[in-house]
Each structure stands twice: as C-alpha cells, then as structure tokens.
Amino acid sequence: MSPSIPSRRNVLKGAAALSFAGAAGALLPDWALAQGQGASPVALAAAEGSRPEIAGQGNLALFNDSLPGPVLRVTKGSELQVQFANALKESVALTWQGVRMPAEAAIAASAAVAGGQNKLIRLTPKDAGTFWYHATSPALARRALSGALIVAEPGTPAYASDNLLFIQSFPPESGVPIFPVNGEFSPTFQGPASGRSRLRLVNATPLFLRLRLKGPAAYAIAIDGQPVAQPFELKDGRLQMPPGGRMDVAATIDDADATIIEVETAQEPIRLAVVTPVGPAGPMPSGPPAPLPANDLPADIPLKDAVRVELPIGGKSGATASLGTVKSGKAMVLTLANSLDAPVSVYVAGHAVRLLDSLDDGWKPWWHDTVPVPAKATVRVALLAQATGTWSVTAQRGGDGEVVASATYQVTA
C-alpha cells in the first residue's frame, strides 16, 4: 500500500511554514556538500556498507556511507575540489557524466584510484545544470557508487524551491524493482502553493523510466543539464528518461493538493515522491516559465562537411574502437546503429550533442549527453568539436547496464 499523501490541509499554513526566499539550496538533502571559493576540498570516500532495508542482504559500495552518495554543489565557473579516498579492495575510476571540461582535467578527474589510495580531484564545470558522478565500472555503479553534482547558475536562483530527485533501483527478492529517491521510499518535498518548484530528476538506474507528474502543468526546462531554449509543457505530465539521463522540470504546485511523481510500469504505477504545497495561496502561474540562463554552446552545427562515423552496437564485444579524428571547429555526425533486441543508452563524453531528424539533416532543439537508442534502431547525433583531446562513447544495455559497445573519438587542434 502506498503511504498517505500529505496535503496543504495537513501542514502548517502561512508564510511562516517555510520561507522560500533564497531557499533553493536549503531544500536539497541535508547530505549535500557545497564548496565555495577558497573552501577546503570536500571529502568523498568509497567503502563497503549495507542498506538491507533497501538493497537486501549483502554489502554495497557506498560513498560516505550514504545512499546515494553526497550531493556535490559548486557554482558555475568555480573550481570544485574533491578529496577522494578509496577504501575498497579494487580500483575505482569516476565518471563525471555530462560535465564539459578540458581533456587534461577530464583525464585527471577520471583516473583510477587503487584500493587503499586517495587523490585530490579538481574540476571547473563549464556549464550550470544537473549532472552526476558514478563509478566508471557498471558493476560498481550498480552497487550504489553514485551521486549528484549540482552546478548552480551565478546570481539569484531562478526558483526558490529547488528539489533533487536522485532515482535508483534495486531488485528485491520478489523480482519487482524498487525505486528509492534520495535513499528513501516516496519522500515528501515542499513547494510554494500556487507557485512553481524546480525538480531535478536524475535516472541513476539501468532502466528506461516512464515517469508521470500528477498535478498542474509541468514544463521541461533543462535536459541532461543543458537549458531548454523554449520550455515546453509535458503532455499529461509524462516524460521518458534513459539510464543516466536527467531532466529539470518546473512543476506548478497546487494551492491545496500535493503533486505526485510516479514511475509507470506494466502493472500498477509506483509512487516515487510527493511535493506538498506550503505557504499562502495566490493566483496560479500560467504559460511556460522563463528559460534558464543558457550555457556556452554553439548556435549552429554546420553539417555539410561534417566527419561522419558509425558506432555498431550489439556486435562482437571487445577492445575499445577508434571512431577517428575531427578538427576543432568542425562537426561530427555519429550514427548509433543498435542491432540488439533491447534499447541502449549511449553516453557521449566531452561534448553535448543534438539528435538529428531521421529524414533530413535538421536537428532536434535540445542538447544531450545521454542518447536513447531503441531496439533494432539507428539514431544519428551531431556535435561541434571544441574540446581537443580523446573522448569516449559508451553504450549500455537497458535493463542490466552492461556495456555493449565502447569507442573513442579524437578532437585535434
């Protein structure tokens, strides 16, 4: 049975219930770790732990003995320093999914740390948005070595209510997945009555998720960390997220009843979280919200002379393939050909990509770093090469997260 849903009638009313002015950071979990200019490095430790109430018997690999790992926070343009200690017996390399940075910094930040060793990780994200970090090894990532990275926009937050929903999954003995959010079952968040709350959704599961927000109108404002130029309404509150994908949503909050976030399954929907209205009621906002500040991404991708390469998915597994080279300032079109009977999620490191239309060389209006490719289907994406260095492309099978194809592409000066 689902727990009862708190409503405005069951919470303290009035402005004194919660001051939303400047409260964006405060509404993130208590285990969020922020770093300001000149602050000491945040500590991140990987070690064995357990969460039998969620993940069943047996050990997990946890960051800071927390499920999920701590939320790392930094402001766009500021340096994040992380003192990473590996108390596991095996080496751990970290992936900073979606974070654009110079190749030298990316190599240093993702270098493996041997068991019993530690190192200082330094990175300065180029983009504001919702990102995440996890063990590069799929097996370790599935054992819970993952957490969110929030890169805040400089200045006053666009939304006073800012809630992170870090979604994980674990297979219980019944075989039906369970979906803790921020390490809890169906947690309750708060949003301004008759206002809007920013929901940062992170799919840290190996599953393709179909989500639904049951409440007033909700708008997509960012995909994979990159702001949407024109926020669009989610039809019936529904959205789909590939493994590793993120979406920021501006959810309109009722003045009386809670908004419910569910994952839709072949059976009954499973409640993920609840957003309860708090504070005085007023006129409801209408129409799409203002766009978030744009990151520094190209306005155009010239496809006429683009380098065109293909990544076969589902053939013989083995060593990482080379997709070739592209000069900085030139475009690359990457064809993702999936011959498997299962969908895959493809992570392109180093650059944000655009999905191309199937019949021509136009592109969809959103940026991605994590691209869904349906079973027995082909998807094309394009990027404008900017960051010199060698970057990875990794395809993981939906359902179990196994790597089914891996390759690199090189950007030269």
Image: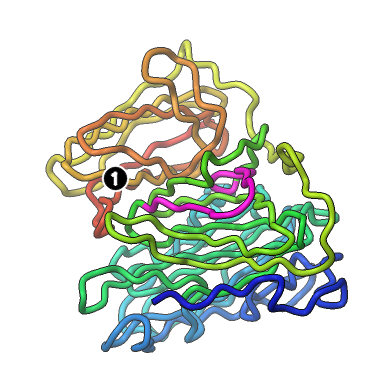
Task: Look at the image and tell me whether residue 93 can be seen.
Answer: no
> Which color mode does the image show?
rainbow
Q: Is residue 240 magenta?
A: no
Which quadrant is the C terminus positioned in?
top right
Task: Look at the image and tell me whether residue 186 can be seen.
Answer: yes
Is residue 266 positioned above or below 38 on the image? above
Q: Main secondary structure of the magenta part?
A: strand
Q: Which secondary structure lies at badge 1? A: strand
- Residue sticking out furthest to the left: 316
Say which of 89 and 99 sits in front. Answer: 99
Q: Magenta stretch: give its range.
A: 209-225
**In the rendering, at what x and y percent does residue 62 appear?**
42, 81
Name the side, left or right, on which 378 lies relative to 225.
left
What residue is at 40 percent from the left and 30 percent from the top? Answer: 325
What residue is at 21 percent from the left and 79 percent from the top? Answer: 173
Give the residue type that dot 1 points to: Val
Q: Which residue is mark 1?
A: 344
**In the rendering, at what x and y percent does residue 49 appear?**
38, 88
What residue is at 43 percent from the left and 46 percent from the top? Answer: 240
Which quadrant is the N terminus positioned in?
bottom left
* Number of numbered discs overlaid on the protein picture: 1
